[in-house]
Amino acid sequence: MNRNIIWRKIIFLALIAAVLNSYDINAQHEAFEFEFGSENTLDNLVYGKSNEASTIKWVNVNTVKEGWTVRPDGVLVNLGLPIGVVRSEKQYENFILKVEWRHMESGGNSGVFAWSNADPKGDSPLPDGVEIQMLELDWVNINAKDGVKPPIAYVHGEVWGVGGVVTVPDNPRGERSKSVENRCKGKGEWNTYHVVCVDGVIKLSVNGKFVNGISKSTQKKGYLCLESEGAEIHFRNLEIIELPPGVTSAEQIAPLLDQ
């Protein structure tokens, strides 16, 4: 084939790739919202006002609308691409989060960010905050290096500060905190997380038992984020119970974003 023709084809393909990439970048910043899950206050529950729960609104940060679907049965389906997050409309300080989740792909990756600024910086598609990890059990097998598997602690609820947020791990694995017992179920099976977040302390219960936590988070009020990280994941029965606020300084609060 003529060298000039080859070069013209290369340039043409490069231009198409640039256009598609530009479209994808713009699409990831499209404005969309959806409602999923419910919130209530501790006082309402104590005084018999559970019927005063309200629906939680989620706002896109850097994903695409097609990546998130709330099915008629109440299950939120995330397709995993592009990598990024959606955030809660409001910020939370002290609260209890309950969420059920299941991965639909072997080695799937996702998570929840608590006390987040919901504002990814630089080349990272993910924001700051405290990440509560959700990895499918086969992740350790897929990511084995030289026949050595990563510790099972990766897959069932590691908790740690990201993006400049510093935390003290209950069960250290470097800066991260690993669970003391593997309680997660595998692909296609529902897992239940209860996450108690109070005054810079987070305790995580996996399928009915507390197994991990962190303390002294340098950021302890912010947005809640659901993560899209390369694999299809389903969420259901997400509930937030807001607890009374603590003594929190301005430096410990994530900046407010435009709604």
Image: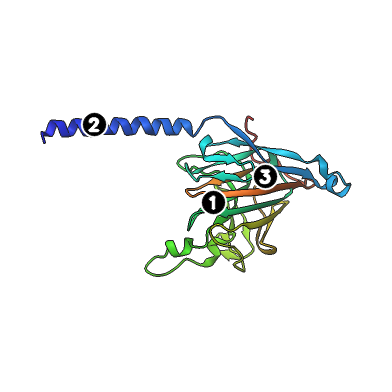
Q: CA distance from mark 2 to mark 3?
A: 50 Å
Asked whether 238 or 159 is in front, the reply is 238
Q: How is the image coloured?
A: rainbow
The x and y percentages for residue 177 are 59, 61
Q: Secondary structure at mark 3?
A: helix
Q: Is residue 116 left or right of residue 66?
A: right
Disc on res. 175: none
Tell me the CA gap for discs 1 and 3.
Answer: 25 Å
Residue 210 placement (x, y as % from top left): 69, 63
Residue for badge 1: 110
Q: Residues within 10 Å of mark 1 (few under 14, many from 20)?
A: many
Q: To which residue does mark 3 refer?
A: 252
Q: Nearer the viewer, residue 178 or 88?
A: 88
**Residue at (67, 42) in percent of width and height:** 253
Could you tell me residue 248's position as x and y percent?
Answer: 73, 45
| Kind of residue at disc 2 | Ile
- Residue position for label 2: 11
Mark 1 or 3: the one toward you = 1
Disc 3: CA contacts within 10 A as few (<14), some (14-19) or many (>=20) = some
Q: How far apart are the two marked residues, 1 and 2, measured between alpha carbons?
A: 37 Å
On the image, the x and y values in percent for residue 134 come to 56, 55
Front disc: 2 or 3? 2
For label 2, count other residues whose C-alpha is less than 10 Å away and answer few (under 14), some (14-19) or many (20+): few
